[in-house]
Amino acid sequence: RASRRPKLALIGDGPDKAFLLERAMRLDVIEQLVVKAPMAARDAYAQGRILVAPSRLESLPYVILEAAAAHMPMVATNVGGVPEIFGPFADRLIPCDDPQILAGAIAAALDETRERAAQKADELAKYVAENFSLEKMVDAVVSGYREAITARGRA
């Protein structure tokens, strides 16, 4: 909806904070920005209805893994390792660098019923728990190193 003016929670601190605040003022959306001190990820997720991760470049982002584990509804871009995290739900991802698509995805996520959003978040959380446990990730890394050592030995 064109009349919708969602709030954005900016949680934490960092080198881009001043730039983001100045830009929000220049664009006259500062009243939609809520700035909060650093806090634990799960506490941060509780501040909003959806996590928006409009990444342009990623490897295997922990923020996506953590949000999935916290059953947080998400809007995320189809970059790097994000489709691997989403697995069978990768069709939910959007292309990066398209503000119109991003805005539409955010609006669609906000328009979903809380029940449907929770169902989708639960589906992703289950998939992530089954495929991205610490044990599985360590085993995959060790296996990759073993394969590389074996391949190097053959060369």
Image: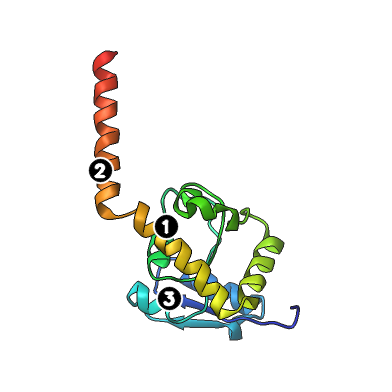
User: Label 3: how many residues lie within 10 Å, few (<14), some (14-19) or many (20+)?
Assistant: many
Residue 125 picture location, percent across and down: 42, 64
Q: Along the polypeptide, which appears first: circle 2 or circle 1?
A: 1
Residue 73's place in the image compared with 92, above or below, is below
Kindly give the residue lying farthest to the top in the view shown: 155
Looking at the rendered structure, the secondary structure element under dot 1 is helix
Q: Along the polypeptide, which appears first: circle 1 or circle 3?
A: 3
- Which residue is labeled 3 in the image? 45
Count of numbered badges drawn on the protein: 3
Q: Along the polypeptide, which appears first: circle 3 or circle 2?
A: 3
Which callout, 1 or 3, points to the residue nearer the camera?
1
Task: Please name the residue shown 43% across and 70% down the image.
Answer: 71
Q: Amino acid at mark 2?
A: Asp
Q: Is residue 18 left or right of residue 28?
A: left
User: Label 2: how many residues lie within 10 Å, few (<14), some (14-19) or many (20+)?
Assistant: few
Residue 6 picture location, percent across and down: 62, 81
Residue 125's place in the image compared with 132, above or below, is below
- Which residue is labeled 2 in the image? 139
**Separation of residues labelled 3 and 2 (CA atoms):** 29 Å
- Which residue is labeled 1 in the image? 127
Residue 104 quadrant: bottom right
Kindly give the residue lying farthest to the bottom in the view shown: 31
Residue 96 picture location, percent across and down: 61, 54
Residue 43 picture location, percent across and down: 36, 79
Q: Is residue 88 visible?
A: yes
Q: Amino acid at mark 3?
A: Tyr
